[in-house]
Amino acid sequence: MFDLVYIGHYTKDTIVYPDATRVVDGGAFNYGANVAARMGLRVAVVTRLARDDWRVVENLEKLGVTVFARATPASTCLRLIYPTANLDERTIELMSSAGAFTLEEIAHLDARAFAIGASVRGEVPTEIVAAIARKGALVALDVQGFLRVVRAGVLVADEWRDKRDVLRYVSVLKTDAVEAELITGEKDRGVAARKLAEFGPREILLTHSGGVLVYHNGAITEAPFVPRALRGRSGRGDTCTSAYLSRRLSAPPEDAGVWAAAVTSLKLENEGVFNRTREEVEAVYARLKDPKKVF
């Protein structure tokens, strides 16, 4: 029995900024497992990737993560293009894919919570979400991997016609403000979160450039991101989701939201996976709990 199990592709991310290009190891499971493992939880991941990228598996195993990895002919490779200094404005190109997950890859696993972080629609089929829900665990799902489709090699958000079939199995739904508006038609983040909950999830975790909003049982709480520098936009949502789930297993939603904001603030200060200490998170968390000390 694990505390958290993450499901999703490894992604080799080529990040193109106006003044530089870098290649980093991405993937929701990679960002997420690094957070949860550093918080002391029992963590497993289910992923697919090429043998050439197996260093990611080895790095997670060194952190104490149990990795169930399937070797595929190619890893999922993404090209993330940021044309301006606004890191919420980007284009993502899909260069190759490691293929869809199968039921056999998750059948033997049990955990208190499962986090599904797909890159594109079809990577995690609906039957896998249903099978996870039948295990009786908390099910977290990032909406981006179900909205995104590939058109002319570019990932774009598309209408999600079967969302009710998927979201009825979900406990915690992760979205950002743009995705929430696309699904609900609502610009107001609070209204959008309430509408998303009507599809089935009891908790909504909504990120935006300024922070994170949590909706639960009719109540909304918010916490700001407070990075001292902004260098690591890629992986923001995956880090936030993992931080929220890691805390949520032992704390109420409103507290988990503040903890997630603290972890994400530190991640935003550097490119790549979260690699800070729990003590650093506690310090930012304490500032966020006392609004007079935030700014």
Image: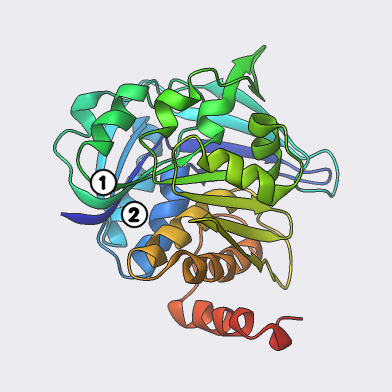
Q: Note whether 226 is above or below 293 in the view shown.
A: above
Instruction: Looking at the picture, tell me which residue is in the foreground, 88 or 84.
Output: 88
Single out the residue that lies furthest toward the top: 152
Q: Residue at x 59, y 79 (%)?
A: 284
Q: How is the image coloured?
A: rainbow
Q: Are there few (<14), some (14-19), or many (20+) residues within 10 Å of tag 1?
A: some
Q: Position of residue 6 (x, y in %)?
A: 35, 45
Q: Position of residue 37 (x, y in %)?
A: 34, 63
Label 2 sits on a secondary structure element that is helix
Q: Is residue 23 visible?
A: no
Q: Are marks 2 and 1 in contact (CB under 8 Å)?
A: yes
Q: Residue at x 40, y 36 (%)?
A: 8
Q: Say which quarter of the image contains residue 294.
A: bottom right
Q: Is residue 276 visible?
A: yes
Mark on residue 264? Answer: none
Instruction: Looking at the picture, tell me which residue is in the foreground, 22 or 119.
Output: 119
* Structural distance between the alpha carbons of marks 2 and 1: 7 Å
Q: Residue at x 19, y 41 (%)?
A: 135
Label 1 sits on a secondary structure element that is strand
- Disc 1 marks which residue? 67
Which quadrant is the C terminus positioned in?
bottom right
- Disc 2 marks which residue? 60
Q: Position of residue 60 (x, y in %)?
A: 34, 54
Q: Residue at x 63, y 84 (%)?
A: 287
Instruction: Looking at the picture, tell me which residue is in the foreground, 121 or 100.
Output: 121
Q: Note whether 294 is above or below 73 in the view shown.
A: below
Which quadrant is the N terminus positioned in?
bottom left
State left or right for residue 110 relative to residue 253.
left
Amino acid type shown at disc 1: Val
